[in-house]
Image (tube, rainbow, N blue to C red):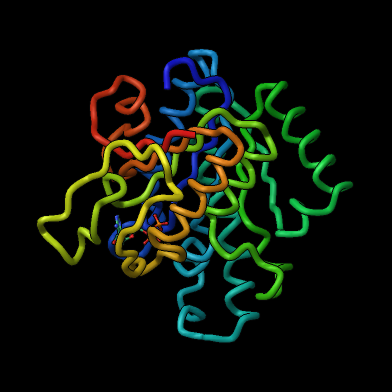
């Protein structure tokens, strides 16, 4: 990863939340510190962050039980502001500016939009701003959604011609079977052909959306576009620095 220049970091819902369902501010601080380290070393960074709904629930807890889609979308609208405020607070300590980019599925498949988004992302990064991307849950109807941020991150990596996508989850990487159910599951450190992978894809966690399946789908998109993908444990302190200095184990999907 040391030669990498353009890095997309995706943060999952389970990584960004505490056990009690609140946004983990300490994690955001540590992530921002790691991202700054990467940028100071000459890399460009884009972050794809989940967590709007969780931040919304902690703001307006009385809505959390309402299954109505409008409440869910309203929670995301409330939470997105809070989430980005946390990123802003952390990045501003290092004098970095952030930008919010909210995308939907169509944005990646309509030629005129793709070009616009690409240009905006390139402009932001060229100017030293850190784009923080999320799905635009408030305007998305279910059928038009990408639906999970692993895929959104892979599309972003594709659109921006990234070299590496780092997906941070609550697990050390890809295991030969679901480690939450099998204590003898072993970590797969290198995947050289993601199309040939045939393993059990268990459920997601409480706040997770895609589980390991969408991470494998993201790896397939990356592989098609010659992008390396890393799946690592965001619960490890300063995980990105540790990946960078080869101090922890994780899964690397070769392009
Ligand atoms: P996130 O919110 O980070 O995207 P998810 O809950 O959606 O997290 O997905 C990660 C979870 O996928 C892991 O915590 C684990 O329980 C589950 N999982 C199922 N099968 C596997 C596997 N073979 N290897 C790794 N994780 C797996």
Residue visible at 47% across and 28% down?
35
Q: Quadrant of residue 157?
A: top right
The one nearer the camera, 47 or 105, is 105
Is the residue 2 above or below the residue 230 in the image? Answer: above
State left or right for residue 213 relative to residue 181.
Answer: right
Name the residue: 72% across, 22% down: 127
In terms of image quarters, where does ligand 1 lie?
bottom left
Which residue lies at the image location 63% right of the left edge and 47% below the top edge?
155
Q: Closest to the observer: 170 or 127?
A: 170
Question: How many numbered circles does the render carry?
Answer: 0
- The answer to whether residue 112 is above or below residue 136 is above
Residue 242, position in %: x, y?
30, 27
- Image position of 192 (left or right of 225): left
- In the picture as drawn, the residue positioned furthest to the right comes out as 112
> What residue appears at the point 54 percent right and 61 percent down from the top-left corner?
148
| Picture quarter with the N terminus | top left
Q: Nearer the viewer, residue 116 or 93?
A: 116
Location of residue 9 in the rendering, given as x and y in whole percent from the top left corner: 49, 38
Image spot of residue 228 (x, y percent) = 48, 33
Nearer to the camera, 77 or 60: 77
User: Seen from this angle, which residue lies furthest front?
Assistant: 196
Residue 48 is situated, as x and y percent measured from the top left of the image, at 55, 45
Up-down relation of residue 239 to residue 155 (above or below): above
């Amino acid at each position: 990863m040391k030669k990498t220049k353009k890095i997309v970091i995706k943060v999952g819902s389970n990584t960004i939340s505490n056990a009690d369902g609140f946004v983990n501010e300490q994690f955001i601080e540590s992530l921002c510190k790691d991202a700054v380290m990467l940028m100071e070393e000459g890399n460009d960074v884009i972050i794809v962050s989940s967590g709007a709904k969780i931040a919304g629930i902690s703001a307006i807890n009385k809505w959390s039980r309402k299954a109505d889609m409008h409440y869910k979308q309203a929670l995301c609208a409330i939470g997105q502001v809070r989430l980005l405020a946390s990123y802003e607070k952390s990045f501003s300590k290092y004098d970095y500016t952030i930008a919010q980019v909210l995308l939907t599925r169509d944005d990646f498949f309509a030629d005129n939009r793709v070009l616009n988004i690409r240009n905006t992302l390139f402009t932001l990064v060229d100017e030293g701003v850190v784009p923080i991307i999320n799905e635009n849950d408030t305007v998305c109807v279910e059928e038009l959604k990408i639906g999970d941020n692993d895929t959104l991150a892979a599309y972003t990596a594709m659109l921006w011609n990234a070299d590496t996508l780092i997906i941070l989850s609550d697990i050390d990487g890809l295991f030969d079977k679901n480690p939450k159910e099998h204590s003898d599951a072993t970590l797969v450190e290198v995947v050289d052909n993601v199309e040939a992978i045939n393993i059990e894809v268990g459920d997601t966690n409480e706040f997770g959306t895609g589980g390991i399946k969408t991470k494998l789908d993201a790896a397939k998109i990356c592989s098609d576009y010659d992008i390396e993908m890393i799946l690592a444990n965001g619960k490890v302190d300063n995980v990105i620095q540790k990946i960078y200095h080869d101090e922890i184990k994780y899964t690397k999907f070769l392009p």
